[in-house]
Amino acid sequence: MIQVERRAGLLLAAGVFAALLAMGVSTSWAQTATHKKAVTAKPEPTAADLFEYIRGALLAYSPDDRINDNLEVSLDPTATVLTIKQPDGHCDIFLSALDANTVTWDFYDASDSMASRQPLARMSVVSLPGKSARICYDLDNQADPSIPTSRARLLFSWEKIPDGSGVQSKVTKAMKKLIALSGGSAEKDIFKP
C-alpha cells in the first residue's frame, strides 16, 4: 500500500510539474510574440522616385543615331507631363491621359532608305478614350500633326541594355506606377474572376 501511495504522490507531483512547465512555456511564448519588433513595410516610391528611375533609363540606354536620341527628360511640377527632348524637337507625354493596362514593348527598326540604324526597343502606351497621349513639337516649337497622339512611345537602344538586367520589366513597373500616381488609369487585372 505504501508503494501505491508513493506512486500516486509521484504521479501527482509530475502532473503538477508538467502543468507548471506548460504554463511557463506558453507565458514565455506570449511574451516573445508581444516583444517582437513589428516589420515595417517598405515605403512606396513617390512620383519623383519613379520619374528619376525612368529618366535614368531613358538617358543611359538612349539611342545614339542623332535622330532618336533622348537628349533630356523632364517632368513638370504637377507630375503629369513627361517631356523628352530629341534632336528634332521634343514630345510632351501626358501621363494622366495614359492607360497602364496598355504598356507594350516591341522591336523597332529605325533604318530608313538613306541610312541603316541600330535596332531600338520601343515602349508604347495607349491613351484613354478621348484623350491625347502626347504632342510632339519641332525645333520651332510647332506641333507636328503627322505624329499620332493616341499613343506615347519611349525609345531605348537594344544594344545598350545589358542581358538579364530586367530593364524592360523594371521600366514597365515604374511607368505603370507613375501613370497611376499622375492620375492616369491604374493597372488592373481584367481577367481576374
Image (tube, helix red, strand yellow):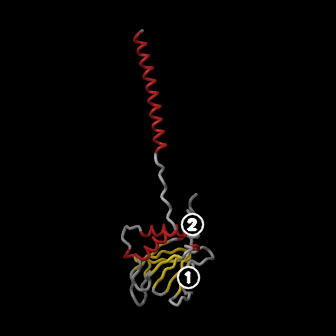
Residue 118 in which image quadrant: bottom left
Q: Nearer the viewer, residue 176 or 146?
A: 176
Q: Amino acid at mark 1?
A: Ile
Mark 1 / mark 2, whichever is N-terminal:
1
Q: Up-down: is 88 above or below 1?
A: below
Give the number of marks.
2
Q: Amino acid at mark 2?
A: Ala
Quick check: 128 left or right of 18?
right
- Read off the residue under disc 1: 135
Image coords of residue 102 (percent x, y)? 54, 70
**CB-based contact (under 8 Å), mark 1 and mark 2:** no
Q: The C terminus is located in which quarter?
A: bottom right
Residue 117 in which image quadrant: bottom left
Residue sticking out furthest to the top: 1
- Read off the residue under disc 2: 186
Q: CA distance from mark 1 to mark 2?
A: 22 Å
Q: Nearer the viewer, residue 28 or 89?
A: 28
Image coords of residue 151 (percent x, y)? 54, 77
Quick check: 79 left or right of 22?
right
Image coords of residue 53 (percent x, y)? 45, 70
Give the class, few, some or many, for how many residues have Cα within 10 Å of label 1's Cα (few <14, many ≥20).
many
Q: Which residue is at a point 45% across and 78% down the rendered structure image?
A: 155
Q: Which residue is at a point 42% across and 12% down the rendered structure image?
A: 4
Q: Up-down: is 64 above or below 17?
A: below
Image coords of residue 22 (percent x, y)? 45, 31
Q: Which residue is at a point 51% across and 79% down the rendered structure image?
A: 83
Q: Secondary structure at mark 2?
A: loop
